Amino acid sequence: MAESKGKVAIVGSGLIGSCWATLFVSAGYSVCLYDISTNQLETSKQTVLKNLQKLKSEGLSRGITTLEEAPSRIATTMMLNEALAGAIYAQESTCEDVEFKKKIFAEMDRYASSEIMLASSTSTIPASKFTEGLNHR
């Protein structure tokens, strides 16, 4: 198995988080999916593997990770600090609610190293609305 390019934390493992995880695993990164539901985490992991299989079968896969390697590149956790530990990048993909995003980004800021890049999948809320006052902004 090729060495991982690094660890990526996916915060929120719904549809958008699963798609981000698919992208990063395909590109050779290890991902750690974080969510508050074990059922959602397992569903997300299976979704990522199905996405990779579909991309491969339709000739659309441009990633370097093989289907055999993929399962070992996906970890899951219900502990945010565990998801962020050692990560080089974190992609937040939670609900589109400014108060919730403020809370989750404050937690991410508390646990993340100063070198990690924190990103959001927000579609309608300016990041400045939920990152005010963060230490690593």
Image (cartoon, rainbow, N blue to C red):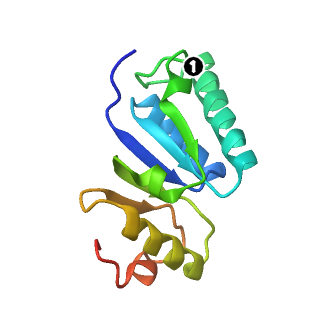
x and y, in percent, of residue 73 in the image: 48, 30
Residue 109, position in %: x, y? 38, 69
The residue sitting at 40% across, 61% down in the picture is 119
Of 115 and 28, nearer the camera is 115
Q: Is residue 39 left or right of residue 113?
A: right
The number of numbered badges drawn on the structure is 1
Residue shown at 71% from the left, 48% from the top: 38
Q: Is residue 41 above or below residue 36?
A: above
Residue at position x 59%, y 76% in the image: 100
Q: Nearer the viewer, residue 105 or 82?
A: 82
Q: Quadrant of residue 133?
A: bottom left
* Mark 1 closeness class: few <14, some 14–19, many ≥20 residues within 10 Å: some
Amino acid type, callout 1: Lys
- 88 lies left or right of 84: left
Question: Which element carries disc 1, helix, strand or loop?
Answer: helix
The residue at the far left in this view is: 115
Q: Residue furthest right?
A: 39
Q: Which residue was labeled with disc 1?
A: 56
Residue 82, compared with residue 69, is above or below; it is below
Q: Estimate the x, y position of residue 118 in percent, counting from the top left.
A: 37, 61
Q: Nearer the viewer, residue 29 or 38?
A: 38
Q: Quadrant of the N terminus?
A: top left
Say which quarter of the image contains residue 116: bottom left
Residue drawn at 46 percent across, 29 percent down: 26
Q: Quadrant of the C terminus?
A: bottom left
Q: Quick one: 135 or 130, which is closer to the camera?
A: 135
Q: Is residue 49 left or right of residue 135?
A: right
Vertical order, 105 against 3 (above or below): below
